[in-house]
Image (cartoon, rainbow, N blue to C red):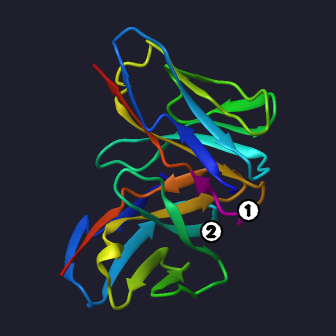
Amino acid sequence: DGGITQSPKYLFRKEGQNVTLSCEQNLNHDAMYWYRQDPGQGLRLIYYSQIVNDFQKGDIAEGYSVSREKKESFPLTVTSAQKNPTAFYLCASSIEGRNTEAFFGQGTRLTVV
Amino acid sequence: KNQVEQSPQSLIILEGKNCTLQCNYTVSPFSNLRWYKQDTGRGPVSLTIMTFSENTKSNGRYTATLDADTKQSSLHITASQLSDSASYICVVKRGATNKLIFGTGTLLAVQP
């Protein structure tokens, strides 16, 4: 099946530890995005990538890092520098273009314990 | 400031009834407006994408309207079903960039 897959669905992390969230797509999309969703707030952009080996900071990139070594994969690392990492993280992908649809993964809920 | 505001924050309706959700935006320049449905704990799923020249777009029981002059959109749900219970998110794409500006969503509960 074509789609975008995030793993794991739930993730627990101790304070001070880095953790990596996986995002894989087989839609042949060039653009991939990471968003963070908190209760009562709209999705906020963390990082995005429009092409392999290139990525740009979004609105809330501090404490996060990404890589785009393959077109299909866009992992997000939540580092210990992120002050409030507990949130629901969503990965999305799209074809470049003004009116193209963005497809979202099912999300990863990260909880810092 | 580029913002998307949705109302109401939450809504409870009885199964079979209709409802309308509102979205006002100040995003400029405007590229397109999208409505997404997000089930609890899942990723958003696209319902419609509307460009500047489109006033109405339907997807089954969902009908979106867009008034680009007043910068308002609505999502009308006809003959609601229990499976319509979800958060509905209005998203505006800013022109000349790939940035999507998200509203905070309207949480809809359909009761039997």
Q: Secondary structure at mark 2?
A: strand
Q: Would you place residue A14 above or below residue B20 in this image? A: above
Magenta: main secondary structure: loop
Residue closer to the observer: B98 or A14: A14
- Residue under pointer 2: B32
Q: Do the CB atoms of the residues marked 2 and 1 lie less than 8 Å apart?
A: yes
What amino acid is at disc 1? Arg
- Residue under pointer 1: A98
Q: Is residue A92 visible?
A: no
Q: Would you place residue B111 above or below residue A2 in this image? A: below
Q: Would you place residue A36 above or below residue A1 in this image? A: above
Q: Residue at x 45, y 56 (%)?
A: B3
What amino acid is at disc 2? Asn
Left or right of A7: which side holds A3?
A: right
The image quadrant of residue B17 is bottom left
- Which disc number belongs to residue B53? none
The image quadrant of residue A108 is top left
- Quadrant containing the C terminus of chain A in the rendered view: top left
Q: Which residues are magenta?
A: A98-104
